[in-house]
Image: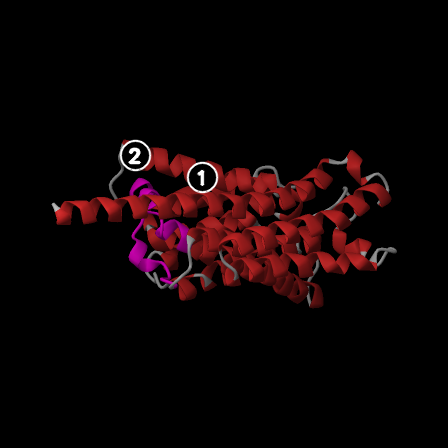
């Protein structure tokens, strides 16, 4: 591996990005029930093994703020290290993605067992919950994000990605990939992200708000609508779904014990905004590209006629 200024700069950016994403979603990044969104970046190792060092460093930095202290700094970082080593050699995306799932499921559970002296059934419960969270992030979000990156030539050149190692899914545009990511993210937020320091949306369904079950359903519907509609119909229908999702969010803010007083609540409010922005950008740039292609065809026809 050649160590250059660019290598150091790229590694620093990826390490910082891993840490920032972990901290941004801190309530769901640590503990036995976790969906560490930053783990998406681990799959960069498949597209370029040089990022393995950056990801191990980023994991270590992110874990310096963990409530488990040195346990997370040692065992969490070790889990990433053990995952990325075989990924540098086994670069088939769906298979390589198994390594961080297995590594985190067992090593993080070992860490929790040592920290809290919980073994037996509790250990296997942690293996299940940590592993499931990793599967959702790696397979539900990570592979989709890597597919999007590999389809963007500017990103490929900037990060020196070997795009042949990404999955080539026909008809899957960058915007569709991000729609899938947002759809899955909506379910993750519902299950694990708190509305305030003590309560999640999932918990509120058992505290007099059973109608909130509509929220993950709407999140899933958003992805389906986005993938199977086109142009103006997609624009109108996806915005309608996002606005529909705002209704239970607002109800929770009004009815749930002062949820509006906490920063957590505004993470949820930011989510529907992303759902609205994505189809608008898709529509604008699609139309712009269509006009550009039409002008190119006209110019080509004129050249041929001359």
Q: Is residue 20 above or below residue 121?
A: above
The residue carrying mark 1 is 15
Give the numbered dot on residue 6: 2
* 83 to the left or right of 193: left
Estimate the x, y position of residue 157 in percent, counting from the top left: 29, 43
Q: Is residue 70 above or below residue 228?
A: above
Q: Is residue 204 above or below residue 64?
A: below
Look at the image and give the residue range highlighted in magenta.
Answer: 147-169
Which element type, helix, strand or loop, lies under badge 1? helix
Crowd around label 1: few <14 · some 14–19 · many ≥20 (10 Å): many
> Which one is in front, 303 or 218?
303
* 48 to the left or right of 74: left
> Which one is in front, 283 or 52?
283
Which element type, helix, strand or loop, lies under badge 2? helix
At a point 42% along the width and 48% down the height, the residue shown is 286
Q: Main secondary structure of the magenta part?
A: helix
């Amino acid at each position: 591996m050649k160590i250059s200024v660019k290598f150091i700069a790229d590694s620093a950016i990826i390490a910082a990005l891993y840490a920032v994403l972990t901290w941004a979603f801190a309530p769901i990044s640590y503990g036995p029930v976790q969906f560490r969104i930053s783990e998406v970046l681990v799959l960069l190792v498949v597209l370029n093994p040089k990022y393995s060092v950056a990801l191990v460093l980023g994991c270590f930095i992110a874990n310096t703020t963990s409530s488990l202290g040195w346990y997370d700094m040692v065992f969490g970082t070790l889990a990433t290290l053990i995952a990325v080593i075989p990924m540098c050699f086994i670069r088939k995306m769906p298979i390589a993605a198994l390594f961080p799932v297995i590594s985190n499921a067992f090593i993080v559970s070992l860490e929790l067992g040592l920290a809290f002296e919980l073994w037996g059934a509790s250990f296997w419960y942690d293996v299940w919950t940590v592993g499931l969270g990793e599967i959702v992030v790696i397979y539900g979000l990570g592979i989709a994000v890597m597919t999007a990156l590999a389809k963007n030539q500017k990103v490929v050149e900037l990060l020196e990605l070997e795009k042949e190692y990404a999955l080539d899914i026909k008809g899957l545009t960058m915007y569709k990939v991000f729609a899938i990511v947002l759809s899955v993210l909506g379910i993750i937020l519902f299950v694990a992200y708190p509305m305030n320091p003590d309560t999640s949306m999932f918990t509120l369904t058992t505290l007099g708000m059973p109608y909130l079950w509509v929220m993950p359903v709407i999140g899933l519907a958003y992805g389906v609508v986005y993938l199977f509609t086109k142009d103006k119909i997609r624009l109108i229908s996806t915005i309608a779904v996002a606005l529909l999702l705002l209704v239970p969010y607002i109800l929770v803010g009004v009815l749930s014990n002062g949820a509006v007083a906490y920063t957590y609540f505004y993470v949820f409010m930011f989510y529907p905004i992303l759902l609205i922005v994505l189809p608008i950008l898709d529509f604008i740039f699609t139309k712009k590209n269509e006009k550009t292609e039409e002008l190119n065809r006209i110019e080509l026809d004129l050249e041929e006629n001359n």
